Image (spheres, rainbow, N blue to C red):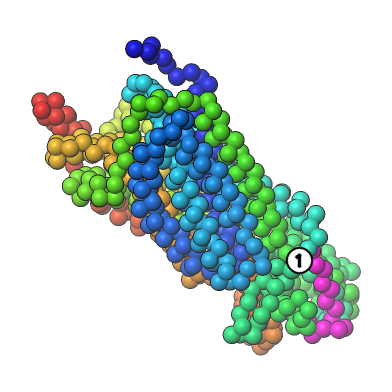
Amino acid sequence: MGERRNLTGREKFAYGIGAVGKDMVYMLSASYVLYYFQDIMGVSAIAMGIILLVARVFDAFNDPIMGVIVAKTKTQWGKFRPWLMIGTITNAVLLILMFAAPPSATAGGMIAYAAVTYIMWGVTYTMMDIPYWSMVPAFTESGKEREGLSALARSCAGVGSAIITIVTVMAVASLGSMMAAKSTDNIVNVYSGKSSDIDYYVVCRDEDGNPTDNYMQMDGTKVTLNVTGTERFFEGAHDSEEGLDGAIYLKNDNSDYSFKTDDVSFEKSDGDSDIEVAIDSKDSSNVTVALYVPVEEYWTMTENLDSEVVIDVKSNQEVERLGFKYFTIIIGILFVLFITITCVCIKEKSTVDMQAASIGEMFRALIQNDQAMTIVATIVLVNTALFITSNLLIYFFKYDLAGSNWRGNYTLFNTFAGGMQILAMMIMFPLLRKAFTTLKIFYICVFAEIVGYIVLLAMVISGVTNVFAFFVPGFFIMSGFGLLNVVVTVFLANTVDYGELKNNRRDESVIFSMQTFVVKLASGIAALVASICLAVFNIQADSASVLDAKGLAYKMSSLGEPQLIDNSSVMGLRMVMTVGPIAVLVIAYLIFKRKYILTDEKLQEIGEELSLR
């Protein structure tokens, strides 16, 4: 009999670094694939929502099938490490392909590309994820040691998720700017009023920065418009039914811009001016430009109508497209490197067996265990509530709070929120557990999240823009969610003992194998809700949108309503990302309170009866 040994620090590090890598990849896909395809590549929001949900439903069948394949694998390197390495390499390749969509693809082709790459990415992630978590018994001895290693890996996974949450938007902007500057595809088009039919307007803002009914049309012969983009940017969206093939629409968050006259000069970084440009094609004579300026500068410009005006506009879409492409390459390389360390440093025992649950066993375990069904439904609802907000958060910062530093504010908020989630799991839960039962902690967490969302709703409706103020609702929401992650895992473990008492069968492996799937299902449902919100409320305000330039000019000149070319209404966005999660959390609370019966006293009774058996 071989001498038992404890895990070395090298092995713990190797397993933990693998968790960092795989959750970096998962968070990059979960948080940004909708934004990338919908906002940058111009895919329909509804189409993306359907793709993301279908992929999650597909996982219901893919996960157990992969479990069976891994369980039956026998090689000289073990049954887990070969699939872990194969899954990692293929997943990294598909991740890079997914965020490197061909910009020349048609609308239908882009939808097909998104569907194929995302679904295949999910398949290969499962190929890697199942052996990663299932291999713990293959190199650990005791239950306590396994529990400690699993806790370490979960913490490392949280670190990986936090890294992506914090650095992505800033890294994408930096890499994209650097690569776009080196690109030879940039095109500069100069539009002059002397040779083109261009309509220029100046719109006056009030003291609060809102557009007013005061506007004037400038003399196009005195204006020069420089527009910089790429072939993809100029050929952008296509709508043959409207006769707008190749139309482009620049809005302030989709471009960098500046304009100057003799007495007035603005840069985008000034934060108190906006520019809107609609052009029906890269060689078009149909151009509409609107400049939004503060009241003092507005009257200055009206007094100097004979001044020469130069407007420079540069598309940012190419920056983000290239930024995501090269950032994903870096993450993919790190992913492969980290998992390679895991596979090299950890040796499997050849005798370990793996129990793989079939789809039938998973559903049977749920149907015959009403408490497991209650907790699974609760996990889906709790995660759906947060994922709805997290999917829409980047749009909230970009289009609602806006401003030239929206990326910095978004990163700062995510840093705080991610930190609170980790602190809640590691510090707050042990402290609260000394004073409260897990049932009371659950109710406290749900109440805290609902309070956080109510505060957030009040803040966005009242027009709060200071990012630090949003730390208040962020504290309640993310602390509550972090604690709920721990609590529902405890509840799920409790349902195993209940199921054994009720059905004379212990479905531990089957029940816990569903946890990853139900979280994926919640992310799919939330993505569909977010996509519907983006489509219904037209939040996709600056993504290769099609606009009839002459129609825009007609509406503005005839009605005098600047809001016709203002950013899409964000009230729907605010309501969906706050009221929606509140409704979902209330439903979770009602289901849990009505159905869950496993109090501490009940669990003690179950334990005593099982011991008697």
Q: In the image, which residues are magenta?
A: 186-198
Label 1: element kind: strand
- Is 126 on the left-hand or right-hand side of 216? left
Residue 323 at least partly seen: yes
Residue 353 sits inside the magenta stretch: no
Quadrant assignment for the C terminus = top left
| Pick the front one: 69 or 514 | 69
State the residue in front, 182 or 85: 85
197 in magenta: yes
Look at the image and tell me in which quarter the N terminus lies: top left
Q: Residues within 10 Å of mark 1 (few under 14, many from 20)?
A: many
Residue 19 position, x and y percent, is 50, 35
- At 39% across and 56% down in the image, what residue appears? 58
- Tag 1: residue type? Gly
Residue wearing tag 1: 229
Question: In the rendered view, would you say 472 is above or below 463?
Answer: above
> Vertically, is 327 above or below 180?
above
Q: Looking at the image, which is closer to me, 361 or 233?
A: 361
Estimate the x, y position of residue 578 in percent, counting from the top left.
Answer: 44, 57
Question: For the point 68% across and 77% down, which residue is it?
Answer: 247
Query: What residue is drawn where x is 45% and y is 51%?
Result: 123
Left/right of residue 581 with respect to residue 496 in the rendered view? right
Count the numbered circles shown: 1
Q: Position of residue 39 (x, y in %)?
A: 59, 63
Q: Nearer the viewer, residue 139 or 111?
A: 139
- Report the residue at 71% width, 49% height from top: 175
In the displayed structure image, the side of residue 367 where residue 270 appears, left or right: right
Quarter of the rendering containing residue 318:
bottom right
45 is higher (above) or lower (below) than 490: below
Question: What is the x, y in percent for residue 65?
Answer: 36, 48
